Amino acid sequence: MSYFSSLFASVSLSITVLAAAAVAQDAKIVKIVGDGAATVSRQGAASVTITQGMSVTLNDDITTGPGVDLYVEVYPGAIATIKENSRVVVENLAANVALLELKSGNIVSQLDPAKRNTHSYGVRTPKGVAAARGTVYVVTVQGVNYTVTTGTGTVSIVATPVPGQPTPAPVNIGPGGVSIGGATAVQASTLTGADAQAVNLAAAVAVAAVATVASPSNAAAFGAASTVATAELTTVMNTVVTSVPAAIGIATATASAAAPDTAAAIVTAAVQSAAATGNAATVSTVAQTATQAAAQGAAQGTAAAAARTAATAAATTASGGAGGLTTAEAVAVAQSSATTAATTAASTIATAIAQAAATAVNAAATTVTGLNATTVNALTATQSKTSAAQGAATGAAQGAALGVTAVVAANAPGNSAGGQVTAIAAAVAAGASQGASTGAIAGATQAAADAGVTMNVAAVNAAAGTGAASGAATGTMQGAVNAGANAAQAQGLLTQVTTSAAEGASTGSGTTVAAPVVIAPVSTTPTTATTAVTTDAAGAQPTTDAAGAQATTTTNTNTTPITPIDPTINVSPSGG
């Protein structure tokens, strides 16, 4: 299975509109976040400390140190957040006009969408300044800064070159097809190999960025931008469904992992987009793919966080607060924490996603002629429950295994060799798979009961068991490598981990589950820095002709687990 190594890390910059000359006016520091130092130098004079409410004038040279963000209202409706360790010079400033020169560091911009056609705001960088034509989301994936610009039915994903590293080519997705590196647009279905992978990755980055800002849990952090993103989540998902259908799985899983509370909305948007085609087969395929992918991504993100919390508490209790676990204690902590976290996450997510999928399909049936009663019943009664159960079980098991392994490895450093680590890994795999399969089945059953439909119990149980075993084995193996196991050690664990995962899944699902086929990972998932997925309400990006190899991605079928970008995202505020 392929892995997207990390995810969204520190923010880059949002580049927006061309500046224009006008009557000069002052801007204002509206908020200071953090305890670090921020100074301003005016007309070459000595620097003075910036205070909240201070005016900012033309040619001011602003510097922020570690641990401080400045929120500058450059004019009504435009706020520039100067991030820590940055230097910015005010190059132009007037009524509804601002141009900031970013000397170093990062800027996050938020503009009032209602003023998109009347304001002129920009950030100058070595790459130049671009005109405003949409909404901008800036994220970092695998150490590469991406600027995602959404427009009417189009999405542009542009990477910032990193010295010494291959740079992904710009990707534009729209009704006319897909363009890579500025080439003539073609239908995505004609792409193969690295080109197909590049487009799938770009689609995943785009949907995940918008979903993170749209997440209800991030509404306070992103302010008005969250409302904009909520509306755009549907349009961006529609662009992916209609223009890059092969990316539906990875985009849905990645976005749902990044923002689990948007997973149901993502499924709904995907099915609505499919319904717009008027093709019943398309609705059926998209519904199943999006349901499984959303459940898997959301469950992985939810379970990983819950597992870390549960395992940390259990480890503290087991060691009496003294730190360090014996092998027996580590095994007990691993299995109980993985089981609990996976059960809860899988149950909750399976219920929510199955319900969302069924509701969306029923709505689609009112407009798509081919969705007759028999087809709708099959989709809502069984297929949505089966897909949700398999996805939730896979994701919850993988997330719980990763989360628990990280905590246990930190609390049992002396138990890293031979049979000790094998016993711990086996406990993680068994606990995660049993809990995930049990929870996913319970969640699907609850969704069926709430809807008053009769699901195919055998199909749901089998799907949950298969998904849980695969997810648990994958998560445990990756967790072991992340914790320091080398290639030889990981290979030595493989048989025991896959066997234990199958046994746990068999117990949890009440079915006989075969040991999953999992390839031992050979590299760690890079540590994720503090993340800021940010947006402003205007901006299009300068064209770059950089091109490079793409990371491998995994597209989805209804029976193959998806590997979303690592779901651990820490969001930094981007607005007042």
Image (spheres, rainbow, N blue to C red):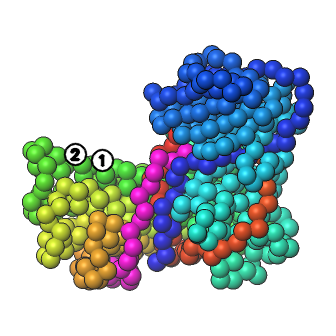
**Of residues 28 and 401, the one drawn nearer to the viewer in this rendering:** 28
The mark found on residue 264 in the picture is: none
**Of residues 93 and 13, the one drawn nearer to the viewer in this rendering:** 93
Residue 162, percent across and down? Answer: 61, 63
Asked if 328 appears above or below 211 in the picture, the reply is below
Does dot 1 land on a helix, a strand or a loop?
Answer: helix
- Direction from residue 17 to residue 43 in the image, left or right: left
Provide the residue designation for mark 1. Answer: 309
Asked if 241 appears above or below 70 in the picture, the reply is below
Q: Is residue 180 at least partly visible in the picture?
A: yes
The answer to which quarter of the image holds residue 141 is bottom right
Give yes or no for contact between labels 2 and 1 (Cβ–Cβ under 8 Å).
yes
The answer to which quarter of the image holds residue 377 is bottom right
Three-letter amino acid code at disc 2? Ala
Three-letter amino acid code at disc 1? Thr
Cα separation between marks 2 and 1: 6 Å
Q: Quadrant of the C terminus?
A: top right
Does dot 2 land on a helix, a strand or a loop?
Answer: helix
Provide the residue designation for mark 2. Answer: 313
**Of residues 68 and 133, the one drawn nearer to the viewer in this rendering:** 68
Q: Residue at x 78, y 34 (%)?
A: 91
Q: What is the span of residues highlighted in magenta in the rendered image? A: 511-536
Residue 221, percent across and down? Answer: 55, 35
What is the count of numbered marks? 2
Q: Is residue 535 magenta?
A: yes
Q: Residue at x 36, y 80 (%)?
A: 520
- Direction from residue 35 to residue 72 in the image, left or right: right
